[in-house]
Image (cartoon, grey):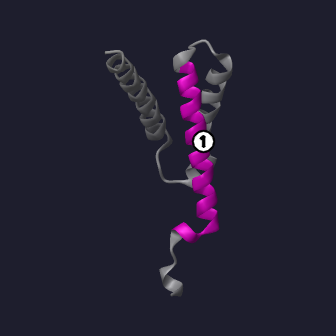
Amino acid sequence: MVGNKNLAEDPYERLANAIILQAVTDYRVALKKIKAHPKNRDAINEALEIERFFRSGWYQQLTSVDGEYLIRGLQEEVRQSESIRGKKNKSDRR
């Protein structure tokens, strides 16, 4: 069926998704490093560089997901995961 092409099979869309997913993974790692060591300049610079990407025209060409929304969501996710991990560690001590 020519008219019913699955977009997930489009190699350009797969590449765009892979680029964004790698940036998301790298951003999470940088945020976790910053959380553990707030003065880690390398992690701060990495996070800022990825934020610039999420705000860039290139990012907007790759996806319709709002970059600011993604940044806020990932920051909240890392905040939540760290607080949940802390609660688990306290319950493990009992």
Furthest-bottom residue in view? 1
The quarter of the picture where the C terminus appears is: top left
- Residue 25 drawn at (x, y percent): 57, 39
In the image, residue 39 lies in the stretch drawn in magenta: no
- Residue 30 drawn at (x, y percent): 59, 28
Q: In this view, does 66 lie to the left or right of 34?
A: left
* Magenta segment main secondary structure: helix
The span picked out in magenta is: 8-34
Q: Is residue 9 left or right of residue 82?
A: right
Q: Is residue 90 left or right of residue 55?
A: left
Mark 1 residue crowding within 10 angstroms, few (<14) / some (14–19) / many (20+): some
Q: Is residue 54 visible?
A: no
x 63%, y 50%: residue:
19
Q: How many labels does the image show?
A: 1
Front residue of 19/59: it is: 19
Q: Is residue 55 above or below residue 91?
A: below
Furthest-front residue in view? 94
Where on the picture, by quarter, is residue 89? top left
In the image, residue 17 lies in the stretch drawn in magenta: yes
Front residue of 4/58: it is: 4
Q: In this view, does 41 lie above or below 32?
A: above
Q: What residue type is labelled 1?
A: Ala
x 64%, y 67%: residue:
11
Where on the picture, by quarter, is residue 13? bottom right
What residue is shown with label 1?
23
Q: Can residue 65 be seen in this view?
A: yes
Q: In this view, does 4 lie above or below 64?
A: below
Q: In this view, does 62 lie above or below 25?
A: below
- Residue 47 drawn at (x, y percent): 60, 28
- Residue 72 drawn at (x, y percent): 44, 33
x 63%, y 23%: residue:
43
Q: In this view, does 87 lie to the left or right of 25?
A: left
